[in-house]
Amino acid sequence: MGRKVAGCVPVLIDAATATPTVLLVQSRWSPAIWLFPKGGVDGGESAKEAAVRETLEEAGVAGAVWGSKLGVWEFASTGQKQKMWLFRVTDVHDKSSKKWKERNKRARQFLSFPDARALMMNVDPAERRMELVEILDAAEKRLAKVQAKAAAKAAAKAADATATASAGTSSVETGDSEESDGSD
């Protein structure tokens, strides 16, 4: 049995525009390859805990896993199976942060999903890792579902607030008309 490996697809949502960007880190072994932070599962930690830890160490970002596991991918180049999660970035550490352990070992960049896909494909075919594109696609699909669910929840909440406000306004209007009726 090989080493257990887990990682995350870190996504940062722009607060002003709600536009998502995905974070890729440069491979330490092949600078042409850009990938997701991942690493070995240490004794005593779950795969999900390892994925979050590796995301901070390799990419210098903190946050939380978004939902259930995206899936498990076996990489043809290494034979490794990797468990992957979608990760919502809430804190981006700069190069001065000691929490970002690999800050001097690899570059990172936030990209749109299409640009990330293009970067993954823009390598020598011998080095191309189609599993990374599959993971990116799964993350993009999951993110779309998460965002649609959040939008529906926000719309329902807004509708409830409007209905409550309308009901309150109707009572006031009815009360006002009764008071001004003068029939008491």
Image (cartoon, rainbow, N blue to C red):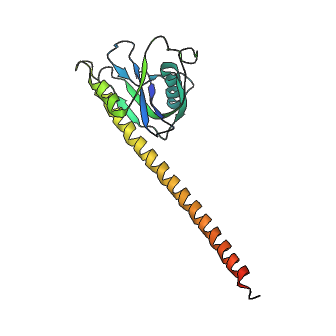
Residue 180 in the figure: left or right of residue 89: right
At which x and y percent is residue 58?
Answer: 48, 19
Residue 21 in the figure: left or right of residue 33: right
- Image point (37%, 32%), residue name: 112
Q: Quadrant of the C terminus?
A: bottom right
- Image point (62%, 73%), residue name: 170
At which x and y percent is residue 167?
Answer: 62, 70
At which x and y percent is residue 81?
Answer: 38, 27
- Image point (71%, 81%), residue name: 180
Q: In which quarter of the image is the N terminus?
A: top left
Q: For residue 157, which quarter of the picture?
A: bottom right
Q: Which residue lies furthest to the right in this view?
A: 184
- Who is closer to the viewer here, 173 or 153? 173
- Who is closer to the viewer here, 38 or 143? 143
Q: Is residue 164 above or below residue 175?
A: above
Q: Which residue lies furthest to the left in this view?
A: 125
Q: For residue 24, which quarter of the picture?
A: top left
At which x and y percent is residue 34?
Answer: 36, 21
